[in-house]
Amino acid sequence: MRLLFDIDRWQEIFQTLQKNKLRTVLAGVTIAFAILLFTLLFGIGNGLKNSFAKSFNDDAINSIFIRTGQTTKPYRGLQSGRKIQFKNDDYAYLVEEFDENVQFVSARIYKNVRAIYKSEQNNYSLRAVHPDHQFLEKTVLQQGRYINNFDLQKKSKVIVIGRLVKEDLFNNRKALGENINLNGVSYKVVGVFTDDGGDNEERIIYMPITTAQAIYGNNDYIDQLNLTYNPVLELDEAISFGNLILKKFKEKHSIDPRDQAALSVSNMAEANKGVGQFMLVLNIIILFIGIGTLIAGIIGISNIMVYIVRERTKELGIRKAIGATPNSIIGMIMMESIFVTAIAGYSGLLIGVFTLKAIGKSLEDYFIINPSVENYVVVGATIILIIAGTIAGYIPAKRAARIKPIVALNDE
């Protein structure tokens, strides 16, 4: 510790580094380049991870979507070409039959509406839903409230509008409590929401599903069933659960088990499992290349340090001849090695971080979003290189410290 604050020792080290600029630069470039590559590699890897995370940012990660189509196979005396239509009893069946493994559940009805408020008007997508839909869609309320069970019971003419719907129709004016005309029917705005899914998701209007059924068709039809499975389920269990739902609903609607078009279940667990496997492989590749980069840097440092000590054999002999102890020689070389490694490693880190920030936007075209690297990862890599530089300096320094002065002075 005393050596760290020995001004004379540091002056001597700086004089030595200045005298041997070429080998100092070579050692520094080797270390900086290794850390730079390491930073860029992990940053781009994290950018790919961010891309996958953003693609699933719109809905709950444990979502399951059940959609209907037309049968393509005859079954139990029923002809092919039948359109499968969900109704309210399908929603009730989903809640009752699978209650233990269901977290949130909602039906959906899709409509396109013309919205008019005073002199402003525009076309929007309308979704009629149950209250749980707020958590399925990861809807964040900016103002007011969401649809509730009282709205369902009373078939209330209330709506929750997206942030961009508010901007289109109200500009900077208050929207809560105001009435919007949708296809000739007046609805009261009770909430304004935001959604991380992007602009399209924020140009949607939500209303109670019972209201839509009463006004737009006077029936109990449902377009789609959505739910989130119990988060305690493992991915394989969640996939099996999704398959069970598909099987049960095919039985309920008399659909051939082999018919793929009549009914479909999109299970986020399957996507999450696939992404998880891909990310595992990606992490292994990044780790493998990253370790390879560090090893290349360590080998480079070691070779340069061996060359440096070999080049300074005569100098070390003179030091020993005038009274320098083996420990002082070892300490001096190690301090040089640590100093060069630390400065060069930090420089490589700064260049890498700056480069990632500079090219971050342009990489979005290649599905690499916000490429960055955690500080602890690069700092850890730098520490490994510093340790490697210490060892690389210690081994040849110890060997040189053992050489007799007369032998060192005669070295050519």
Image (tube, rainbow, N blue to C red):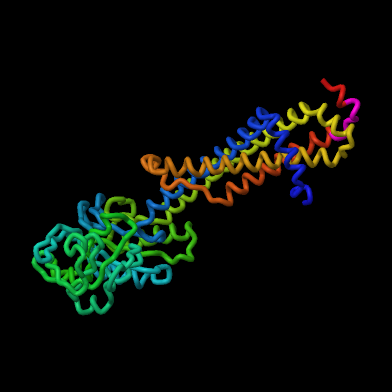
The quadrant holding residue 88 is bottom left
* Residue 389 position (above or below residue 72): above
Q: Give the range drawn in magenta.
A: 401-407
- Is residue 121 or residue 268 the one in the foreground? 121
**Residue 96 percent coordinates (x, y):** 35, 73
In depth, the one of 128 and 384 nearer the eye is 384
Residue 147 in the image: above or below residue 268: below
Q: Is residue 108 visible?
A: yes
Expressed as whole percent of the image width and height from the top left, the position of residue 15 reads: 72, 35
- Residue at left offset 73%, top offset 38%: 13
- Between 387 and 227, the residue placed more toward the observer is 387
Q: In which quarter of the image is the C terminus?
A: top right
In the image, is 407 to the left or to the right of 198?
A: right
Seen in the picture, residue 181 relative to 299 is either above or below; the reply is below
Q: How many labels does the image show?
A: 0
Instruction: Give the side of residue 313 with respect to residue 366, left or right.
Output: right
Question: Percent x, y for residue 397?
Answer: 80, 35
* Residue at screen point 28% across, 73% down: 145
Magenta region includes residue 219:
no
Is residue 282 visible to the viewer in this orientation of the structure? no
Residue at the spot x=70%, y=42% of the render? 338
Residue 206, position in %: x, y?
23, 66
